[in-house]
Structures are given as structure tokens and as C-alpha cells.
Amino acid sequence: MLITIYGGPQTRASIPRWYLEEKGIPYELIDIALSSGQNLQADFLSVNPFGKLPAMCDQSVTDTEGRPTTLFESGAILLHLAEHHGREAMTASEKSLISQWTHFANSTLAFAIFVPDQKAKVLPRLLQQLNMQLSKGFLVGDTWGAADCAVTAYLAYIKLFFPNDDLSPYPQIDLLIEETKQRPAYKKVMGID
Ligand SMILES: N[C@@H](CCC(=O)N[C@@H](CS)C(=O)NCC(=O)O)C(=O)O
């Protein structure tokens, strides 16, 4: 298998895995057990010296000496997959927009969801705008892609981590999360039966 994802249940490895599953791109999954500290053992530190999941090794994209590309950070992995395997990010403009949405999801949106004072102050403004953006269709181009994967994965975290949050002022987001939870690829990577 050319692509290896290092992941584990209930980690952000579900994000690049969801993308791979939706696009039908083959990959090997190596589970690293956080509970036993396997992420801090030398074997895995040689893949990601920070000991964090996910990480990825792609034998099909090599450097000038033929070494495979090894990456950490779910957003960077997603961008790499979109550019080299997902048949998207074909133009410079698309590539930049996918990068924008992935950074937005992993930094601005993630902080607004998980940092308590940001959640009160910033999240409503972001959700209001996203609710409008999402009613227009996919975030970049005319097919589901990495930008949708990154943003939707974080929106779905709201219901997962804060099930009592009221999303009724944002019906498009609520609908998107409910539809996402029914998608076979998402169910598979999230371990939903
Ligand atoms: N910003 C990083 C976050 C990586 C991260 O914090 N991963 C968690 C699992 S979701 C982890 O590996 N935690 C184990 C540790 O920090 O020891 C990404 O999106 O990949």
C-alpha cells in the first residue's frame, strides 16, 4: 500500500481517513495506542517526533533522493491528499482556497469550539456565517472535497463533545452534521454502527 496513516480510535486521524474513504483511495492504517504510550516510543517518534496522531507516510510522492513523504498535522495530510490523490486542487486558486478552509477549520474554528471564552465570544459569529456559506453548496468547486472534510469534521465535533449545544439557529449546519453521520465513510472512521 502506498499510503500509510498512523492513527487510533477517537483521534483526529479520522479526518484524513474520512477523506480517503470518501474518495476511495486505498491506504493502510496502523493503529498507535495512546493509552499505552506507543506514540512516545522510538518507532513512532521516527515518523512524528512530536508523538502526535495522525501521521502519514506516502511512498508515491518522494523527494529528490527517492524518500517517501512523511507528514504530521491532519490539515497538512489533508492538503497533501487533495493535491496528489484526490483529483482536486487542480488550479492554483482551488489549491489556495482548500488551504484557506483547512487552516480555518484547524485553527480558527477548532479554537472557537474548544477554548471556552472563544466559544462564547467567537463561535456564534463563525456558525452564523458558515450556515450561510454551506447553504450555497460545497466550499470549493462543485464536488465534495478536502475543504468540506476539514470544516464538517470540526462542526460534527460540536455535537460529539457538546451534545446539549443548541444548533437550531444554524439549520444548515445541523442538517449537514446529521447527513454526515449517515455517510458510510464517516461512520466507518468514527466507529459508528
Ligand atoms: N493539530 C494536530 C493535533 C494532533 C493531536 O493533538 N493529536 C492527539 C490525538 S487527536 C494526540 O496525538 N494526542 C496524544 C499526545 O498528545 O500525547 C492535528 O490536527 O493533527
Image (cartoon, helix red, strand yellow):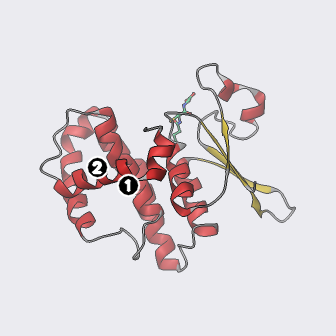
What amino acid is at disc 1? Val
Identify the residue at image location x=19%, y=42%. 121
Q: Which residue is drawn at 31% across and 54% down?
A: 179
Q: Is mark 2 on a helix, strand or loop?
A: helix
Counting from the top left corner in percent of width and height, residue 178 is at 28, 49
Q: Compared with residue 117, is residue 87 higher up or lower down, i.e. above or below?
A: below
Marker disc for residue 59? none
Residue at the far left in the pictured view: 169
Vertical order, 106 against 92 (above or below):
above
Q: Is residue 150 above or below residue 166?
A: below
For marks 1 and 2, give the CA distance: 14 Å
Q: Nearer the viewer, mark 1 or mark 2?
A: 2
Q: Answer whether residue 76 is visible to the viewer in this image.
A: yes
Q: Mark 1 points at which residue?
A: 151
Residue 108 in view in this figure: no
Amino acid type of the residue tagged 2 in the rendering: Glu
Q: Name the residue under label 2.
A: 178
Is 140 on the left or on the right of 41, as rendered?
Answer: left
